[in-house]
Amino acid sequence: MIAREWKAKCPKIHEEGFIAYLYETGVKDTAKTDGFLGAQIFNRDSSEGAEITLITYWTDVESIKAFSGEDIGVAKLYPEDDKYELQPDHYVTHYNVRENTWVNAD
């Protein structure tokens, strides 16, 4: 399994709206790609507003290419990102997932 990490910053006033938009684009759109296994969205306050991280999970590099294009290191940005005064990373980081243990936190 491969994890793909992307980050962006935006003003706090756009945080909730951007997270909803990110879910619609970066998660729901991505989920249509064969080999997509899931996603997590993280957020935290930063000195520049809000920092948002999207981690998607994939079966293999070929699946990522089907989503992102041949250069998997380049972030896939969406047309309305500017609406949220986004400061996006233009590159993503990939990790081989070595351990995947989830504890049910009921």
Image (tube, rainbow, N blue to C red):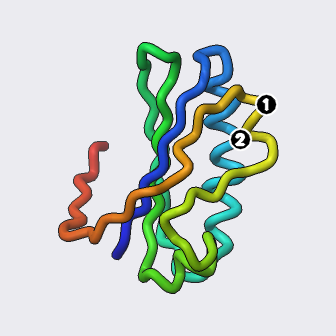
Mark 2 is on which residue type? Tyr
Residue at mark 1 to residue at mark 2: CA–CA distance:
10 Å
Q: Residue at x 80, y 41 (%)?
A: 80
- Is 78 left or right of 49, judged from the image as shown? right
Query: Mark 2 sits on what residue?
Result: 21
Task: Check the image and report above or below for 15 versus 29.
Answer: above
Q: Which mark is residue 105?
A: none
Q: Residue at x 43, y 66 (%)?
A: 57
Q: Position of residue 86 (x, y in %)?
A: 65, 32
Quadrant in the picture for residue 5: bottom left
Task: Check the image and report above or below for 64 versus 104.
Answer: below
Is there a contact, CB below 8 Å, between mark 1 and mark 2? yes
Q: Position of residue 4 (x, y in %)?
A: 43, 61
Task: Check the image and report above or below for 27 versus 36.
Answer: above
Badge nearest the viewer, 1 or 2: 1
Query: Mark 1 sits on what residue?
Result: 83
Q: Residue at x 24, y 65 (%)?
A: 100
Please give the count of numbered marks on the rendered protein: 2
Badge 2: residue crowd in 10 Å (few <14, some 14–19, many ≥20): some
- Is 85 left or right of 49, judged from the image as shown? right
Q: Position of residue 52 (x, y in %)?
A: 50, 35
Mark 1 is on which residue type? Lys
Q: The C terminus appears in which quarter of the rendering? A: top left
Q: Position of residue 82 (x, y in %)?
A: 76, 34
